[in-house]
C-alpha cells in the first residue's frame, strides 16, 4: 500500500505527496469517452428528429439526463485525476500554465467556429454573452442566454476554469484532513450537495417557469442555474473527486469491483430519471458515478481486467475533450441544415445519426492531432521547481518528461 507523505511544507503545489504507481489511469481515460458520448446522445436526440415516432420519444426520455450525468462525471473525475497526478515539485503558476495550454486553444477554435454559426443563424447574442463565453465566465451569469452563449457546451469549461484556479489552494487544505477522517469528509461534501438541491428547491425563486425540452414548466432557470451551472456549487463534485483520490491512495477504498461499480452508476442514472429534475440533473446524480471512478483507478493500479483500458477506448478517451467541445456545433449545424422538426425513415435517421457521430469524431481527431497535442507537447510540459525537487525527490525532474496525465 502506498501512503501519502507527511513531510515539511514547501513551495510546491502539493506538500510531499507520494503518488501511487502507475501514474497512468487508462481505464479512466476510456471512461471519459463514455461520458462524452452520453452528452452527445442528449444533444442529438433533443435537437433533431433523426429518431422519429414512439421510439424517438422513448429514447429522448431515456437520454434526457445523460448529458448532465456525463458532465457530473467529468467534474468528479477532474478532481480525482488532478489529485492523483499532483507533484511535490509543482507550483501554482506551472499548474495553471499547463491547464491553460490544455484547454485554451481548443476553446478558442471551437468558440470561433461556433461564432460563425451563431452569426449565420441570427441567434440573439449580446456583447456580454460574447465576452463571458470567450473568457469562460458564462457559468457565473444566472441567465440562460449568457450561460449557454456561443458554444453551448463550454459553460462546463467555465466551471473547470474555476476549479483550476482554486486547486493550488484547495488541495493542500484538503490534504490536512487525516486519513481516518476522509470518509467523514466525503459524507460532509455529500450533505452539502443535498443542501444545494434543497436550497434550489425551497429558497431560490421558482418563477418564471421554464418550458423547454423536457422541463415542462416544473422549475425556473434560477433554480437550474444554482444547482447545475453555478461554479461554487459544482465545485463540490470536484472536491469529492479530490477526496476519492486520497481515499484510494491511502488504501481505504472498499473492495468494489469495476463491474459492480459500473452497474451502480447505471442504476443511479435510472433513479435520476424518476427523481425531481433538480435532484437528477446535477450533484446528487453525479455522486452515483463516484464509485466507478475509484474502482477504475483501483483496477488500473492492480492490473485487473478492464474493458475501458482497451486501446480503442483509451484512444477515444484521448479525443474526448475535443469531441465534447466540437460535437454541439456539429449537431446544431446539422439540425439547422435538416430543420430540427424534419423526420426521416428509421434506417435513414439511424444512418444520419451515425454520420453526425463520425463527423464529430473526425473533427475532434483533427483538433487533437493538429492543435491540442502539438501545443501541449511544446508548452504544456511539467517544469519542476528546482529547489523543491532537490529537497523532496532528486529523481523527480528526470521522470517529469515521461509523465502523462490521463486527462
Image: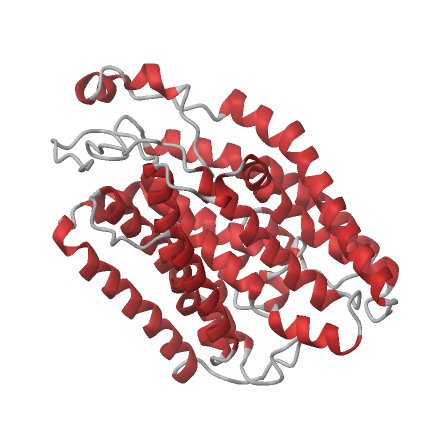
- Residue 364 relative to residue 203: left or right: right
At x 74%, y 46%, the residue is: 358
Residue 241, compared with residue 267, is above or below; it is above
At x 41%, y 19%, the residue is: 401
At x 22%, y 29%, the residue is: 11
Residue 193, compared with residue 86, is above or below; it is below
Residue 264, compared with residue 389, is above or below; it is below
Residue closest to the far front: 305
- Residue 376 relative to residue 150: left or right: left
Residue 377, horizontal then vertical, whole percent: 53, 22
- Residue 385 relative to residue 318: left or right: left
Determine if residue 230 is in view.
no
Which of 383/5 is in front? 5
Residue 13, horizontal then vertical, whole percent: 28, 34
Residue 246, compared with residue 400, is above or below; it is below
Q: How is the image coloured?
A: secondary structure
Which quadrant of the figure contains the N terminus? top left
Residue 145, horizontal then vertical, whole percent: 64, 65
- Residue 185 relative to residue 205: left or right: left
* Residue 328 sits in quarter: bottom right
At x 62%, y 84%, the residue is: 216
Which of 370/304 is in front? 304
Residue 155, horizontal then vertical, whole percent: 55, 56
Amino acid at each position: 500500500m502506498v501512503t501519502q507523505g507527511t513531510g515539511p511544507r514547501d513551495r510546491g503545489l502539493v506538500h510531499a505527496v507520494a503518488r501511487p504507481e502507475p501514474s497512468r489511469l487508462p481505464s479512466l481515460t476510456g471512461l471519459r469517452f463514455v461520458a462524452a458520448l452520453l452528452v452527445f446522445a442528449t444533444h442529438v436526440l433533443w435537437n433533431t428528429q433523426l429518431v422519429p415516432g414512439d421510439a424517438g420519444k422513448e429514447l429522448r426520455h431515456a437520454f434526457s439526463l445523460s448529458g448532465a450525468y456525463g458532465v457530473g462525471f467529468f467534474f468528479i473525475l477532474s478532481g480525482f485525476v488532478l489529485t492523483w497526478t499532483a507533484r511535490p515539485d509543482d507550483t501554482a503558476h506551472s499548474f495553471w500554465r499547463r491547464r491553460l495550454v490544455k484547454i485554451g486553444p481548443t476553446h478558442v477554435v471551437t468558440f470561433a467556429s461556433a461564432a460563425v454559426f451563431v452569426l449565420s443563424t441570427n441567434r440573439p447574442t449580446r456583447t456580454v454573452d460574447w465576452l463571458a463565453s470567450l473568457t469562460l465566465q458564462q457559468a457565473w451569469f444566472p441567465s440562460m442566454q449568457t450561460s449557454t452563449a456561443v458554444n453551448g457546451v463550454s459553460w462546463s469549461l467555465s466551471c473547470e476554469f474555476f476549479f483550476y484556479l482554486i486547486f493550488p489552494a484547495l488541495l493542500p487544505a484538503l490534504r490536512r484532513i487525516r486519513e481516518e477522517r476522509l470518509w467523514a469528509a466525503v459524507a460532509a461534501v455529500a450533505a452539502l450537495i443535498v443542501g444545494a438541491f434543497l436550497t434550489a428547491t425551497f429558497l431560490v425563486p421558482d418563477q418564471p417557469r421554464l418550458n423547454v425540452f423536457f422541463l415542462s414548466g416544473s422549475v425556473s432557470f434560477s433554480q437550474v442555474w444554482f444547482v447545475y451551472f453555478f461554479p461554487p456549487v459544482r465545485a463540490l463534485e470536484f472536491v469529492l473527486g479530490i477526496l476519492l483520490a486520497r481515499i484510494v491512495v491511502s488504501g481505504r477504498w472498499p473492495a468494489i469491483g469495476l463491474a459492480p461499480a459500473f452497474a451502480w452508476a447505471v442504476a443511479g442514472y435510472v433513479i435520476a430519471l424518476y427523481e425531481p429534475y433538480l435532484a437528477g440533473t446535477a450533484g446528487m446524480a453525479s455522486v452515483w458515478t463516484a464509485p466507478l471512478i475509484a474502482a477504475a483507478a483501483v483496477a488500473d493500479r492492480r492490473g485487473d481486467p478492464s474493458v475501458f483500458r482497451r486501446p480503442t477506448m483509451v484512444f477515444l478517451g484521448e479525443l474526448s475533450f475535443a469531441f465534447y467541445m466540437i460535437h454541439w456545433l456539429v449537431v446544431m449545424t446539422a439540425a439547422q441544415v435538416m430543420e430540427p422538426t424534419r423526420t426521416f425513415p428509421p434506417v435513414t435517421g439511424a444512418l444520419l445519426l451515425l454520420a453526425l457521430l463520425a463527423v464529430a469524431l473526425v473533427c475532434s481527431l483533427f483538433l487533437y492531432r493538429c492543435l491540442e497535442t502539438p501545443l501541449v507537447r511544446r508548452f504544456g510540459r511539467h517544469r519542476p521547481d528546482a529547489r523543491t525537487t532537490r529537497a523532496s525527490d532528486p529523481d523527480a525532474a528526470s521522470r517529469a518528461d515521461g509523465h502523462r496525465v490521463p486527462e
